[in-house]
Amino acid sequence: MQLVYADNNATTQPAPEVVEAMRPYLSEVFFNPSSMYEAARKASEAVGKARDVVARFVGADAKEIVFTSCATESNNAAIAGVAKAVPARRHIVTTAVEHPAVLEMCREMARAGWEVDFLPVRRDGSLDVDAYVRALRPDTLLVTVMHANNETGVIFPIAELARIAKATDPRIVFHTDATQTAGKLPIDLAGEFREVDLLSFSGHKLHGPKGIGALYVRRGTPWRPWLIGGHQEGARRAGTENVAFMVAMAKAAELAAAHLSKDEARIGRMRDRLQAALQERVPFVEVNGLGAPRLPNTLNIACHYIEGEGILYQLSDAGICASSGSACTSGSLEPSHVLRAMQVPFTAIHGSVRFSLSRYTTDADIDRIIEVFPRIAAALRALSPYWDAARNAPRTGSAPAPARGK
């Protein structure tokens, strides 16, 4: 059975060129780049070249890039580092739909005495910019808003939000988690994103390996290191450099930049074809995030009256890898915090499934999902005690009335 991988927002397949680029630094060029002897120079030079490539990828200067272990570390370091640098300012603005790497860090800051505003989103997952403007205050330290949501693909107007923050008070530091957009959308920190002070992203979301990330820290931004105890990364992140993975992330960034415009169009067409087919063939579904700008690779579709966990198990049995819009697969019965913030109806919030495509997704993969998914939804609904009553219920009064194909 041919595997269909449609969970690229979770992780991507490392490109063959990436694996090949890192291979020498796992074998013959194994040296510590901080060592002074001649043999270590190749490792040190590789780190410098990788930093240059990653910096160009986002329109930054090499000295503004700090390599980290992952985007979670980058996000944690961004938030805590600003708070350490400017302890007098005690207010943080974020959204209710951030990735847990930001959301939980902001909750930790609240427990430590900072005041945090978790801004709501609209039904389509977009941010109410007027509410954002009202949330900014004279003592606001930091704004941290994701570039695009990992579950729904909804894109936030980061350039506009950063401009508003700086116009309110130039001392406000603006951070964005760009983990889901680096390699999928253009990012230019010297151009459109010139008001962004901190930006996080990860290697394994753009066909690099797991275990490597980066944090952009704009020159002059008040920020203190998160990991201390060494001189590495210009004394901004202690710990022996992971040379092979730095080289790999740079190669992945280089490939992503070369493929970006072509991939964006082709992947968007496949996503739209999948969306239209499922809307047509599966009754009582809705697309989470429909109506808002979305990443071209992401489809989060909610099936009323069935559980996403059951859908995922049966998709897996058919050789299709996807993920749920709820947290039930991690052992929790609580639905996704993103879908709750979007006020997805209770009849659908547990039945949301995310398909996320990549450079390696094929039209045959899309055909296979279109073939299998409607059968799974129909079979699970036949077992649901709510299905017969729901589909025959009048569309008036208090009975839930999900729309077909919305």
Image (tube, helix red, strand yellow):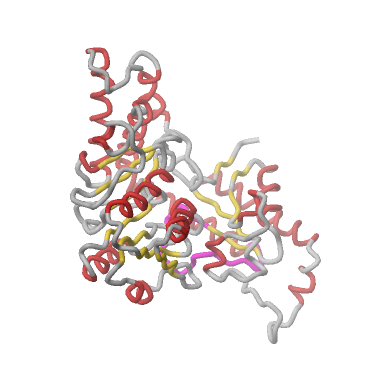
Who is closer to the viewer here, 257 or 68? 68
Location of the C terminus by quadrant is: bottom right
Which residue is most to the bottom?
A: 397
Q: Nearer the viewer, residue 402 or 72?
A: 72
Q: Position of residue 405 (x, y in %)?
A: 59, 68
Whole-percent x and y of residue 83?
33, 54
Could you tell me which residue is drawn at 27 percent across and 49 percent down? 223
Q: Is residue 346 above or below residue 33?
A: below
Specify the quadrant of the image occupied by residue 378.
Answer: bottom right
Relative to 230, say whether 131 is above or below: below
| Quarter of image, res 268 | bottom left
Q: Is residue 403 magenta?
A: no
Image quadrant where one finds the N terminus: top right
Range drawn in magenta: 281-299
> Is residue 183 toward the left or the right of residue 154 in the image?
left
In x, y percent, where is residue 69? 40, 37
Dominant secondary-structure state across the stretch colored magenta:
loop
Percent position (x, y) of residue 51? 26, 35
Identify which residue is drawn at 46% across, 45% down: 358
